[in-house]
Image: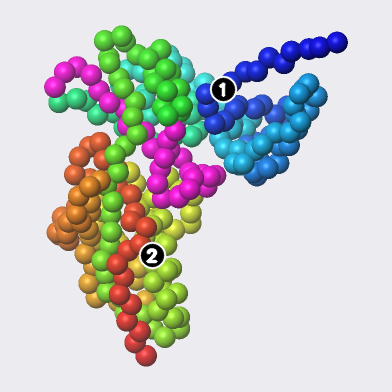
Amino acid sequence: NSWQLDLSYINTNGVKLERKFSPDIRINESFHLQANKIVLPPATVPGLTSVCQPFPSFGGKPDETEIQMNQRVAIDIGTKGQLVCRGDYFKLITTKFPEIYYCKVVKERKGKGCNLFLVGNNANDLWASPFLPLISNSLLAEVNDYVAKRTSIFANVMCAAFGLEEVKFKATITINSSVGSDFAKADINNRLNYYLSPWTSTVFSQISIDSPIYIEEVIRIITELNYVKMVNTLIVQTATSGSDLVNLNSGNAIIPSQQSLLFVSAKTHDLTIKVEL
């Protein structure tokens, strides 16, 4: 007896899986599988001998807690499930999509449309770099579809990821001899990265999106370290894609050059460490 295997080709590099638990068990965190954990499907498939899983899983949503349910119901009652004012977008979208950390509505200068810029949430540290708030095209499409069903057909709202404006600190810092200069440079660099990345989870001080950068605040964060004696000089430099770094005046509140841009940290800041005995 002969049989024919029907092949289904999927034009994607991932699949969506659902994990089943007993109804009396509630799981308040999403599970993630490391690479190469899935080797065979639970049920035998004729002609299928192995499964290749070269990448770890990502995404996923845990069970809704009672507090989250109450928040969702309160928001639905307040907005009637419709997106009307600017605050509605943030409340509804971040509640529906935990993968979204922040959203911002920007009206177009010409025309009646507006853009909805999104920032991804890196609470689970699954990105290649925690300091780049990446959003997948599939998630953008989901949010676009969600928004389209809850706005007027004349609203013309389009979802997109923020453009990125890199921030680099150039500083000369004097430390005591309790730690080495290499340790101090790496530690301060790491803290500055987290300061500019509020979508990451950390115990360090962080800026808020759409809040200015103040030189005095950055100096305070550095001098709070017990091995730092003083910050001699500190300059803020910014650059957009394809442009050179530009020095900004320290006396001003430093904000992104355009509403569609988001400050992100340079991978490495220009730090000169001086050790004073």
Residue 194: x %, y % from top left: 41, 55
The tag on residue 189 is 2
Q: Main secondary structure of the magenta part?
A: loop
Work out whether residue 9 or residue 105 is closer to the camera in this orientation and state it: 9
| Whether residue 273 is situated above or below residue 219 in the rendered picture | below
Residue 81: x %, y % from top left: 43, 15
- Name the outermost residue toward the front: 2
Give the Cα separation between the discs numbered 2 and 1: 43 Å
Q: Please check the rendered image and state whether residue 115 is part of the magenta-colored stretch, yes or no.
A: yes
Residue 25: x %, y % from top left: 75, 30
Q: Is residue 78 visible?
A: no
Mark 2 or mark 1: which is in front? 1
| Whether residue 117 is situated above or below residue 83 in the rendered picture | below
The amino acid type found where label 2 is placed reads Asn
Q: Residue at x 22, y 37 (%)?
A: 259
The amino acid type found where label 1 is placed reads Ile
- Tag 1 secondary structure: loop
- Left or right of 125? Residue 238 is left
Residue to which mark 1 is pinned = 10
Q: Residue at x 19, y 54 (%)?
A: 244
The tag on residue 48 is none
Q: Residue at x 42, y 29 (%)?
A: 137
| Residue 234, image quadrant | bottom left
- Tag 2 secondary structure: helix
